[in-house]
Image (cartoon, grey):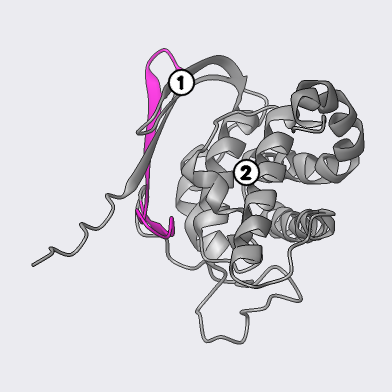
Amino acid sequence: MTQPDEPLAPLVLSYRFQLQPDRKLDFEIRLNGESLAYEGGAEAGEPPVGEPFPCSDCPISESGLPGCPVLASIKPYLDPFQGMASFDRVDVTIESRERFITHKEASLQRALSSMIGILMVSSGCPDLDKLRPMVRLHLPLASVEETLFRAVSTYLFAQYMRSTHGLDPDWELAGLVAIYRRIEVINQSLSHWMRTDAESDTGTNAIVLLDVFAKMLPVAMERQFAEFETLFKPYLGDEG
């Protein structure tokens, strides 16, 4: 008699911010081992009050949820940084199952954007769900080039899976551009809400930095693809 498969262990990501010689902030993000859905961490996020759905065309605003799942996920992680400047220099250490990374002297907004990006994608927002596979192989503090490569690879993997399920694949990457255009709208809505609610610009600028990546990715695709082409020459011959 076969035993049922063991459930996958939660994916745990730890962030440590060394703000000053005598002050540090530690955070732990727990994601479901199978779905990579956010399961908690700093504390169980409560939906913020006031403006619970920043995006005017939110697809789940009428679903009965008490508030925006993105804000509910990120707010407990941003509150401890109230009053700090986004350009303060910090040392950040990031630990996951696969790697241990220490980055010296990063700006606070840069370090925070790495953590906030995970929370946003795993929060349950249906518009961000399509980026969730990237969290499984999260690359902290990634460059634009690294993010582009991972985003395109993830999207093409998804199209292959669509084809194996009898669905039409999008090999032209039109859907990937549409995904990032939508992310721009979400980022702008969140940053607008945070400007009116937060006591400092730290969280807002972390979102703005994510928005810069979202804006750059569609623009960078054509240029970056030309640079990558040389690397893929072994695949471009008759036997590729």
Question: Could you tell me which quadrant the C terminus lies in?
Answer: top right
**Whether residue 200 is situated above or below residue 89 in the rendered picture:** below
Observer-nearest of 111 and 76 = 111
Q: Amino acid at mark 2?
A: Gly
Identified by mark 1, the residue type is Ile
117 or 89, which lies in front? Answer: 117
In the drawing, what numbered circle is on residue 101?
1
Element at badge 1?
Answer: strand
Is residue 30 found inside the magenta-colored segment of the image?
A: yes
Q: Is residue 23 above or below residue 179?
A: above
Query: What label does residue 203 carry, if any?
Result: 2
Q: Measuring 62% from the left and 23% from the top, which residue is drawn there? A: 88
Tell me which residue sits at (60%, 60%) in the image: 161
Quick one: label 1, few (<14), some, or many (20+) residues within 10 Å? some
In percent of the image, x 60 and y 72: which residue is there? 52
How much space separates mark 1 and mark 2, taking CA atoms?
A: 22 Å
Q: Residues within 10 Å of mark 2 (few under 14, many from 20)?
A: many
The residue that appears at 63% across and 38% down in the rendered structure is 202
Percent position (x, y) of residue 154? 63, 47
> Does residue 58 show up magenta in the picture?
no
Place of residue 56 in the rendered image (x, y in percent of width and height, measured from the top left) = 76, 75
- Is residue 140 depicted above or below 6 in this figure? above
Camera sees residue 85? no
Q: Is residue 69 above or below residue 222?
A: below
Measured as percent of width and height from the top left, residue 95 is found at 39, 29
- Range of magenta residues: 19-40
State the SS at label 2: helix
